Amino acid sequence: MRQRTILLDERLDDAATRGLARDLVRLGVEARPLHERDRVVGFVAVLDDEGAARMAKKTGVCRVLSAPSPHPLAGHRGGGPRVVRVRAGSARDHVEIGGDAPVVIAGPCAIESLEQLEACARAVAGAGGRLFRAGAYKPRTSPYAFAGGGSEVLAMLREVADRHRLGVVTEVLDPRDVGIVAAHADLLQIGARTMADVALLREVGRARRPVLLKRAPAATLDELLSAAEHLLHAGATDVVLCERGVRGFDPASRNLLDLAAVPLLRLRTELPVIVDPSHGVGVRSAVLPMAAAAIAAGADGVMVECHPDAGMARSDGVQALSLEVLPRLFAQTHAIASAIRPSMATAAE
Ligand code: PEP
Ligand code: MN
């Protein structure tokens, strides 16, 4: 007898799910349901090999994992890549992350002024962008550094993004701010420093929205997936994973951008994976080359920081792209993605 995870077909209705729960009772085992959003997506049950084989053959059972999976919701479920839909511009407009086209999320590190936001948003939309990033709550290394404008600047971010028909991506740092961030953002960002903050993960999950989860600088990929599991378990509608560099040994770069994380995450999850080369390297001239490398490694998109006057930026100016290079970033992203899609399809077979 061993604990198993029984994953259900995504299209299964409630009546069929209840039928499978009864089958498990008939086998004489107690089954604990696994919830995602409002749906039961599987069961954890103690079964012998014969019982496991019998359950695996039932209609509606997608897979029976012989060990209890540490992240049954975030891990590989066998249903193919999961496309995360993010509202962008209006209630009817959505961007797909993890779909056919790579996504570029761009914007300043922090919200500094209306003029700065307006210039960035115009440049991002003009380059073909659909998602706009900008931080109101900044997790800074030093308590003396600019920590962002907080709740007061969120309405300004929303207004500027709406004017340019862009979706809003912004970080939530504190469980107490989830309500106000969710009221203004389309994709809620959890930053590297708080990746494993379970209280925050639970509260953000309860907002039932898509989440962008950044990998902590010393987190293993399994730890990243466990954080995603917390979000999905608490109710997050979907999760996009983001590699943004791990702690390296060489101060030549801010972090060590772990691009191998992209194909390695593909072995473990169907959630979309994007890469942030701005925080990953921390050096402006390296951002475009590493964004290109990220797409070549199979990432579903990139997230970069930009600024109209990087020398005057209140945070992360040294890694901010000038607005003029954004069209080049978008063009290279699409060129590389279309060049490698056929080989990616072959590799996945
Ligand atoms: C950010 O994207 O604004 C940020 C703070 O990045 P990270 O959490 O990866 O350091
Ligand atoms: Mn930053």
Image (cartoon, rainbow, N blue to C red):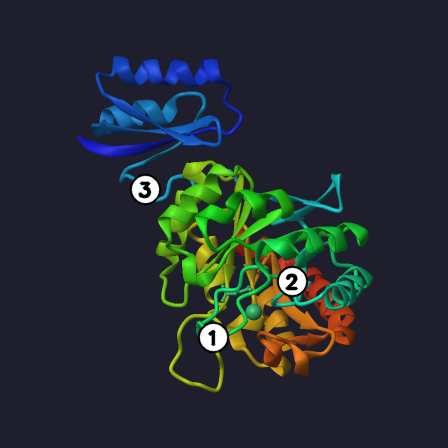
Hey, what amino acid is under mark 3? Ser
Q: Earlier in the sequence, mark 3 or mark 2?
A: 3
Q: Which mark is residue 170?
A: none
Q: Which residue is mark 1?
A: 144
* Residue found at x 42% / y 58%: 194
Quarter occupied by residue 310: bottom right
In the picture of the structure, the residue carrying the numbered disc 3 is 69
Q: Determine whether the residue tagged by mark 2 lies in a helix, strand or loop.
A: helix
Residue tagged 2 = 340
In this view, the residue in front, 252 or 54, is: 252
Residue 75 seen anywhere in this rendered image of the structure: no
- What residue lies at 42% left-to-right and 37% top-to-bottom? 234
Q: Nearer the viewer, mark 3 or mark 2?
A: 3
The secondary element bearing badge 1 is classed as loop
For the N terminus, the image quarter is top left
Mark earlier in primary sequence (1, 2): 1
Q: Is residue 21 above or below residue 338?
A: above
Label 3, secondary structure: give it.
loop
| Residue 82 at x, y percent in the picture | 55, 43
Q: Hey, what amino acid is under mark 1? A: Tyr
Report how far apart the C-alphas of labels 1 and 3 lie in the structure: 43 Å
User: Label 2 amino acid?
Assistant: Ile
- Up-down: is 201 above or below 50? below
Q: Is residue 122 left or right of residue 54?
A: right
- How many badges with numbers are in the image? 3
Q: Nearer the viewer, mark 1 or mark 2?
A: 1
What whole-number distance in Å separates the C-alpha atoms at marks 3 and 2? Answer: 32 Å
List x then y, in percent, for residue 184.
64, 47
Is 16 displayed left or right of 151 in the figure? left
Residue 168 image point, x, y percent: 66, 52
Question: Answer yes or no: do the residues labelled 3 and 2 have beta carbons within 8 Å?
Answer: no
